[in-house]
């Protein structure tokens, strides 16, 4: 099984069909019975994997081996179209569940009075100048499923928050909780943000991610608006991320 005991695969050798239940599924309603080579189907399947299957990545690795020697032409999941050219979804799953990560930093953030946003908008080009791909997600407007999809591949997450009642902003709290629940294959993390009087945001965020087996590369917190020393610290963080990503 994959994420639930009833999620069982049935193999029909006479017709070379693999009925996979939730395995390889996608939340996609379409008039087309077969996926063909439509790249959107694999995108929808990635979202399904990110939101539902990613916590069971290690289990799926074993299940891919179990079906590896079966001779089938069709994969028929219980959600989404039938894969009549299953190589795309098989290759995608092999990549998603592997331990390989991309040279990608994911930045979920929100800002109340502009300080955190200024830091994010400085950090993004600082990373890009060092050859690092960045995806940022403004949490008051973002599609949280797209954040989950980005976490499938990312090597690093930089969690960015202003301080609210001594802790992280509720939207950042929620996104951090989600990342912890999904258990992506992240290698590194950092925390940046701002505060007015005092903050326990770093301690509280750190306590939210016990499932993320990451090396924390540092924190950058500014009091009020960021100043020259804060921007310098962000450049130092970018250098540290570049050095770590050079090894992946």
Image: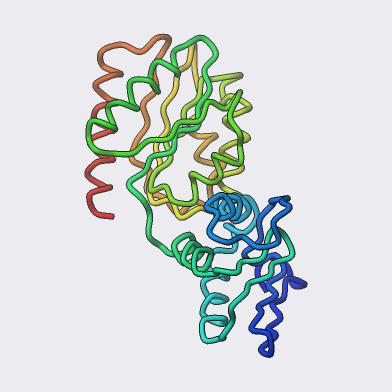
Residue 219's quadrant in the figure?
Answer: top left
Q: Nearer the viewer, residue 112 or 78?
A: 78
Residue 81 in percent (x, y) is at 68, 60
Left or right of 162, for residue 144: right
Residue located 54% across and 75% down the image: 64
* Relative to 205, residue 31 above or below: below
* Relative to 166, residue 147 above or below: below
The N terminus lies in quadrant:
bottom right
Residue located 39% across and 37% down the image: 190
In this view, the residue farthest toward the bottom is: 14
- The way the protein has been coloured in the rendering is rainbow
Residue located 66% across and 78% down the image: 18
Count every numbered label the image shows and give the total. Answer: 0
The C terminus lies in quadrant:
bottom left
In this view, the residue farthest toward the right is: 6
Residue 166 in percent (x, y) is at 56, 21
Q: Nearer the viewer, residue 195 or 234?
A: 234
Left or right of 230, for residue 136: right
* Relative to 75, residue 36 above or below: above
Left or right of 230, for residue 170: right
Residue located 54% across and 39% down the image: 147
Left or right of 41, for residue 188: left
Residue 226 in percent (x, y) is at 35, 13
């Amino acid at each position: 099984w994959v994420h639930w005991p009833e999620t069982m695969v049935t193999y029909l050798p006479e017709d070379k069909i693999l009925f996979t239940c939730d395995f390889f599924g996608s939340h996609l309603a379409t008039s087309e019975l077969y996926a063909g080579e439509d790249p959107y189907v694999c995108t929808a399947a990635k979202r399904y994997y990110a939101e539902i299957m990613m916590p069971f990545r290690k289990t799926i690795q074993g299940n891919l081996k179990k079906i590896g020697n079966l001779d089938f032409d069709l994969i028929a999941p219980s959600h989404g179209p039938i894969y009549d050219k299953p190589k795309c979804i098989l290759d995608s799953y092999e990549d998603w569940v592997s331990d390989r990560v991309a040279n990608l930093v994911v930045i979920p953030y929100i800002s109340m009075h502009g300080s955190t946003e200024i830091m994010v908008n400085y950090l993004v080009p600082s990373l890009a100048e060092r050859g690092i791909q960045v995806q940022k997600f403004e949490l008051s407007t973002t599609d949280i499923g797209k954040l989950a999809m980005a976490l499938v591949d990312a090597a690093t997450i930089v969690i960015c928050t202003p301080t609210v009642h001594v802790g992280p902003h509720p939207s950042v709290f929620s996104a951090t909780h989600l990342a912890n629940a999904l258990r992506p294959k992240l290698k590194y993390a950092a925390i940046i943000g701002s505060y007015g009087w005092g903050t326990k945001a770093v301690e509280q965020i750190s306590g939210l991610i016990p499932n993320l087996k990451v090396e924390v590369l540092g924190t950058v917190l500014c009091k009020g608006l960021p100043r020259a020393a804060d921007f310098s610290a962000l450049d130092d963080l970018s250098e540290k991320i570049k050095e770590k990503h050079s090894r992946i």
